[in-house]
């Protein structure tokens, strides 16, 4: 059996090879999960779906992931399962295959539920791997990890546009081969993770968990603020991931493939912004990154529904860059609020993000049916203004310095 050698320095040094592998795995996971929203125009035509039903598809997938992730995180905080990541990828692969052969709306809902289960297993434990491999550079590690996911979310729609849209629903099954590559990468992660845990257990006496001096009430209040910020971010993101292509097609009369290129540009900007946000948070403080990322994007979101196509493309890139820098900072900030509970925090925040995305998609679909897609983007534009509440977060960097 293959083994991975580990050294005591692994706990203190940033293990970039593992960060890049887990980031690559995240790329594959989120690429696969991005396929279904990317083909919503095709599914809408094939199954004669309303916007409300499109929203229900997203809601079903995301709410399954949302409910399960905190429980997975709590369980793995106490019982680490290095190879559980492979199980998560298998659920995603099976779910995609079922989507490719789905013959009814109900069948689609069952299929995307399996993808949601895969996500609920993957994100808490893979986030823990990034934390363990960080060597103290938690913002950087989380950004590298998130970069993979956002890159996958950008590439998925592009591949779907050129593989699935021209050839039909059955070609979704082609993405199962990409899932197999992900399983091989996660096997490597499992080997390292097992060795790392053994070494960590052997060095428990020297391993210390960083703490702060905040009261439990202040911690809970701060977590509530972070969750509200997640709500504003992912409710707005739901308008993009589920309805951006419809907005472009409806307002500017472009083709499905052209709309996917614009979605790719937005998703690419999200990937770049994610990579930038974590390291900046390590240097200047995560609170300031969160503030600028959420509140600072508001002028651009409010302009988006009113400008010509060229400027829509430019603004969507700016929005993606700024808005995406928040999540890594929020996640690391939350782990510092609750030291030693990485799985629970990751599960809670990934789960809440998925839940808000799913709920947002369902609600916005109803609004789109009752009004118009353009109206959805006009009202969502004000969500980033909620970022003003960041002012109530404590500055953890200062507290550590006392």
Image (tube, grey):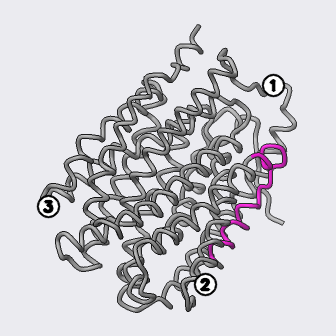
Which residue of the protein is positioned furthest toward the front in this rendering? Answer: 370
Q: What stretch is highlighted in magenta?
A: 74-93
Q: Which element type, helix, strand or loop, lies under badge 3?
A: helix
Residue 29's quadrant in the figure? bottom right
- Label 1: which secondary element: loop
In the image: residue 136, left or right of residue 85: left
Q: Quadrant of residue 385?
A: top left
**Which of the two residues, 57 or 367, is positioned nearer the viewer here?**
367
Q: Mark 1 points at which residue?
A: 206
Element marked by disc 2: helix
Farthest residue, direction top: 402
Which is more foreground, mark 1 or mark 3?
A: 3
| Residue 163 visible in the picture | no
Location of residue 4 with respect to 202 vertically, above or below: below
Q: Residue at x 66, y 41 (%)?
A: 345
Quadrant of the snapshot with the N terminus? bottom right
- Is 73 covered by the magenta stretch? no
Q: Give left or right: position of 115 versus 55.
A: right
Q: Mark 2 points at which residue?
A: 107
């Amino acid at each position: 059996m293959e083994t991975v050698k580990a050294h005591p320095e692994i706990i203190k040094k940033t293990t970039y090879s593992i960060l890049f592998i887990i980031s690559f795995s995240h790329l594959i996971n989120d690429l696969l999960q991005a396929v279904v929203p990317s083909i919503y125009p095709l599914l809408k035509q094939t199954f004669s779906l309303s916007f409300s039903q499109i929203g229900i598809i997203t809601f079903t997938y995301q709410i399954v992931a949302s409910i399960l992730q905190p429980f997975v995180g709590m369980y793995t905080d106490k019982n680490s399962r290095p190879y559980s990541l492979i199980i998560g990828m298998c659920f995603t692969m099976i779910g995609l295959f079922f989507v490719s052969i789905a013959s009814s709306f109900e069948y689609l809902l069952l299929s995307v539920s399996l993808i949601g289960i895969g996500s609920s297993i993957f994100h808490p434990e893979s986030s823990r791997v990034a934390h363990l491999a960080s060597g103290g550079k938690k913002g950087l590690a989380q950004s590298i990890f998130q970069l993979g996911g956002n890159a996958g979310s950008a590439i998925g729609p592009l591949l779907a546009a050129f593989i699935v849209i021209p050839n039909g629903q059955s070609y979704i099954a082609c993405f199962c081969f990409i899932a197999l590559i992900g399983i091989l990468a996660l096997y490597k992660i499992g080997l390292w993770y097992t060795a790392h845990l053994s070494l960590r257990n052997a060095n428990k006496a020297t391993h210390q968990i960083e703490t702060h001096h905040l009261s439990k009430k202040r911690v809970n209040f701060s977590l509530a603020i972070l969750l509200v910020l997640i709500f504003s971010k992912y409710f707005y993101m739901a308008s993009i991931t589920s309805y951006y292509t419809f907005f472009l097609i409806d307002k500017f009369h472009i083709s499905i493939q052209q709309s996917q290129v614009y979605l790719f540009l937005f998703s690419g900007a999200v990937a770049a912004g994610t990579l930038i946000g974590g390291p900046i948070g390590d240097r200047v403080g995560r609170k300031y990154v969160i503030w600028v990322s959420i509140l600072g994007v508001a002028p651009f979101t409010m302009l988006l529904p009113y400008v010509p196509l060229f400027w829509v493309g430019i603004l969507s890139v700016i929005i993606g860059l700024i808005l995406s820098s928040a999540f890594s900072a929020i996640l690391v900030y939350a782990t510092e609020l609750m030291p030693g509970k990485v799985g629970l925090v990751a599960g809670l925040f990934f789960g809440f993000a998925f839940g808000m995305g799913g709920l947002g998609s369902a609600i916005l679909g109803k609004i789109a049916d009752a009004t118009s897609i353009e109206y959805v983007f006009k009202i969502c534009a004000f969500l980033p203004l909620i970022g003003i509440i960041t002012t109530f977060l404590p500055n953890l960097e200062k507290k550590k310095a006392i």
